[in-house]
């Protein structure tokens, strides 16, 4: 049985996520932009937090960690490579590591690009991938530290997950990401439909995440850089996918 998943809006456009195992009572949060909304959700559901999972060191993903740790006694897990700039870790993780939430074994995936030490968490039985600012809904994170080649390789790892995986990313950037995507593939019918669906969801105040990986494969230009349509759209019909990805990322930075 899949772990229960709760999406929690934080700050102006961040998301945190709770995953809860009903049998054991174990509950984890992925990223802590702000402790208050997470504590409120835990109280409302009567859940006790056991684990805090950190994807990367940016303040809008960790600023509430210490408050949440002190309030709940939860263990903190994050990347060993980023331990020097994360809150103190109870468990420092590498890509070879795995751990359990309830009865589910969680896989750690190195996804450098947005930052060098960025990691993602894959819950294969539940079908969840917590990708924060690596693979984002309709886009990918800006390359603050890594190279385009690193980010392309990271995205390929995530693209190889089962297509029905729910991608749980860290921000409500979907509408603007898809507006950019439409400049590259205006004839992509799946993309045009998704733009309409996202507009409807946002008008109703609903989050546009999580989203199925298959939807990303059909509409996210950063996952589609190896396709002839995208190569042609950026005027690089004979280039390799990593080069096309770099051009798409540069255009998004100027968008």
Image (cartoon, rainbow, N blue to C red):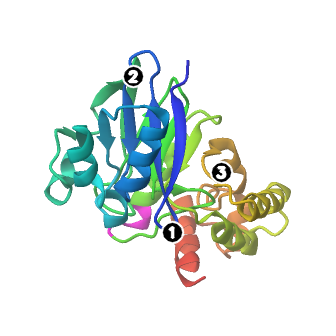
In the drawing, what numbered circle is on residue 44?
Answer: none
- What kind of secondary structure does the magenta stretch mostly adopt? loop
What residue is rendered at 42% in x and 61% in y?
149
Mark 2 to mark 1 CA distance (whole Å): 30 Å
Which of the pair 2/246 is nearer the observer?
Answer: 2
Crowding around mark 3 (Cα neighbors within 10 Å: few <14, some 14 to 19, many 20+) is many
Q: Nearer the viewer, residue 246 or 183?
A: 183
Position in image of residue 53 (x %, y %): 33, 43
Question: Height in image: 174 above or below 44?
Answer: below
> What residue is disc 2 on?
25
Residue 157 visible in this rendered orientation of the protein: no
Q: Which residues are magenta?
A: 145-149
Circle 2 SS class: loop
Q: Is residue 158 left or right of residue 216?
A: left
Location of the N terminus (image quadrant): top right
Q: Which residue is mark 3?
A: 216
Q: Nearer the viewer, residue 234 or 143?
A: 143
Q: Answer with left or right where residue 20 lies relative to residue 211.
A: left
């Amino acid at each position: 049985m899949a772990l229960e998943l709760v999406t929690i809006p934080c700050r102006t456009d961040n998301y945190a996520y709770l995953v809860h195992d009903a049998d054991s009572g174990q509950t984890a949060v992925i990223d802590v932009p702000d402790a208050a909304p997470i504590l409120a959700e835990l109280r409302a559901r009567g859940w006790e937090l056991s684990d805090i999972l950190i994807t990367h060191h940016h303040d809008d993903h960790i600023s509430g960690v210490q408050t949440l740790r002190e309030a709940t006694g939860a263990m903190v897990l994050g990347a060993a490579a980023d331990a020097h700039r994360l809150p103190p870790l109870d468990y420092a993780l590498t890509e070879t590591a795995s751990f359990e939430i309830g009865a589910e074994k969680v896989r750690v995936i190195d996804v450098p690009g947005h930052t060098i030490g960025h990691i993602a968490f894959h819950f294969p039985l539940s079908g969840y991938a917590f990708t924060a600012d690596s693979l984002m809904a309709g886009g990918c994170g800006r390359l603050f530290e890594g190279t385009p080649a690193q980010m392309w390789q990271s995205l390929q790892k995530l693209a190889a997950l089962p297509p029905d995986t729910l991608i749980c990313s860290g921000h409500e950037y979907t509408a603007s990401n898809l507006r950019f995507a439409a400049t590259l593939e205006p004839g992509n019918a799946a993309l045009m439909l998704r733009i309409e669906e996202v507009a409807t969801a946002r008008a109703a105040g609903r989050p546009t995440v999580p989203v199925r990986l298959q939807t990303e494969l059909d509409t996210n230009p950063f996952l589609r850089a190896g396709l002839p349509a995208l190569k042609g759209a950026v005027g690089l019909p004979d280039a390799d996918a990593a080069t096309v990805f770099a051009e798409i990322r540069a255009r998004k930075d100027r968008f």
